[in-house]
Amino acid sequence: MKIAIIGTGYVGLPTGVGLAELGNQVVCVDKIAAKIEALTQGKVTLYEEGLEELYLKHLKSGALRFTLDMREAVNGADVVMIAVGTPPHPVTKEADLQYIYAAAEELAAYLDGYTVVATKSTVPVGTGDEIEAIIKKVNPAADVDVISLPEFLREGFAVHDFFHPDRIVIGTDSRRAREVMRRLYAPFADKTEMLEVSRRSSETIKYASNAFLAMKIHYINEMADFCEKAGADINEVAKGMGTDSRIGRKFLNPGPGYGGSCFPKDTNAMAQMGRKFGAMLNLIETTIAKNDERKLEMAKRVAAAVKHNPEAKIAVLGLAFKGGTDDCRESPAMQILEKLLHYNRNVTVYDPQAMENARAVLGDRVSYAADPYEACAGADIAVILTEWENFKHLDLEKLKAKMLQMQIMDLRNLLNKEEVCRQGFCYSCIGMKN
Ligand code: UDX
């Protein structure tokens, strides 16, 4: 099939690359000339495990192309996927749909033959109706079905998740559109649940899923606070809870609060929708407020650990919003760091992938290190803020030799407490008596 993808971000690009690997002809279109130029020349514009290799393969084979020209992408396409951003409005926190509507208006003029326009971006319930109305207004003769096709790709694992989806949700009542989607996703038919639902249900499923996962994280963080007071160990408690298959082990890792481009945005948008429809979503409202508070609490915790020394050097390990990505958007690490800079100016940072993105925000307010050991050289405390796999395997002997004071605050519970303490470090983590 010929597929057009509008938007080459964390959703559009991995989706385009994945669909090319499935044997489709994919044209990705974006408004940012520098991005299209780089992508045309073989320079991948974002970090995703396994993405570059597949992208180069299909750029070379010709199955994957990039353009600034909407007409070139949409003309003759069987499916047009909208994968542009829906950033939160700075005040109301509602999803800002201007890029979605602009894309719908622009693509409408170039539709020819029967086309499925699928919304991949996370959009409030009812947006599909709006997109359909825009397209019909611009091009009344268009033979088109507008469907909701939510993405469930985790950043950092987008390529893996594309090829191993838990489910594919197809939101439309149109039999023709369902048929096209069944053909497109036929390679997954045997191993993946295909849910065919109404467009509004599909739009809701995406928000309801992300809000539930955010609440699950908030819940385990609240339990961690409880364990600290009650003398229990959150790692043991989470393991005990997770073995109940109704609860599940995943998303029970306590931390400094959730972040990223999805959970904060989607929980806020969902809460806003609840208010709009007059169906208050109290659990979600509380989750949002408590998750924001948590980051301030964590910054205070770090500041308190070195309060006796205003000149203390703090080594921050991890800046990305989670491990496996270079993305710092709504990163708890960055938000904690910003707050920390109010108390202490002597901070050195290190992240395996996110240094460039972090530098664009932090500028010269912090020092940058080439590895965790350089970050910790002469430090009074090392603070782990992102769940990078390689932080679990820090060489403690080496760290010991570098640090001024042997103090580690592990806000992701990555390290083995006994081992770290045995090495003589003063160690604190989340959800247990320290
Ligand atoms: C999320 C959804 O998981 C994905 O299905 C959706 O399509 C996009 O949004 P993503 O934002 O990439 O994916 O990150 P995710 O892995 O869900 O983590 C989000 C945040 O929660 C991160 O800050 C992470 O560190 C935090 N988290 C996650 C925890 O603190 N504890 C956990 O147990 C899991």
Image (cartoon, rainbow, N blue to C red):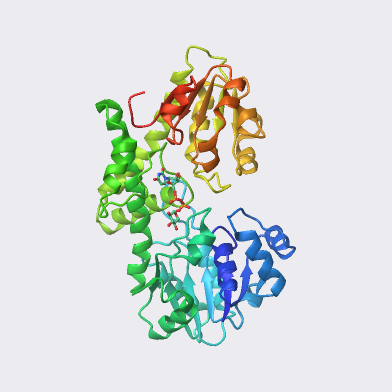
Residue at horizontal 47 percent and vertical 15 percent from the top: 307
Q: Residue at x 59, y 38 (%)?
A: 351
Residue at 66% from the left image edge and 60% from the top image edge: 32
Using the image, determine if residue 94 lies above or below residue 204.
Answer: above
| Image spot of residue 209 (x, y percent) | 35, 57
**Vertical position of residue 258 compared to residue 404: above or below:** below
Query: Is 67 on the left-hand or right-hand side of 281?
Result: right
Q: Is residue 222 visible in this depiction of the protein?
A: no
| Viewer-side residue, 19 vs 341 | 19
Judging depth in this view, the residue of 269 and 2 nearest the camera is: 2
Q: Which of the 4 quarters of the picture holds residue 418?
A: top left
Considering the image in quadrants, where does the C terminus appear? Answer: top left
Quadrant in which the N terminus appears: bottom right
The reply, left or right, for residue 402 in relation to residue 179 is: right
What residue is drawn where x is 54% and y is 48%? Answer: 324
Q: Position of residue 290 (x, y in %)?
A: 34, 38
**Residue 422 horizontal side relative to residue 34, left or right:** left
Question: Is 352 on the left or on the right of 89, as rendered?
Answer: right
Examine the rendered structure and indicate whether residue 41 appears above or below residue 191: above
> Looking at the picture, how far across and down is residue 215, in whole percent?
32, 47
In this rendering, the answer to whether 5 lies above or below 122 is: below
- How far across and down, in percent of the image, does residue 96 sit? 47, 56
Return the residue nearer the eye: 203 or 2. 2
Report the residue that reaches farthest toward the right: 41
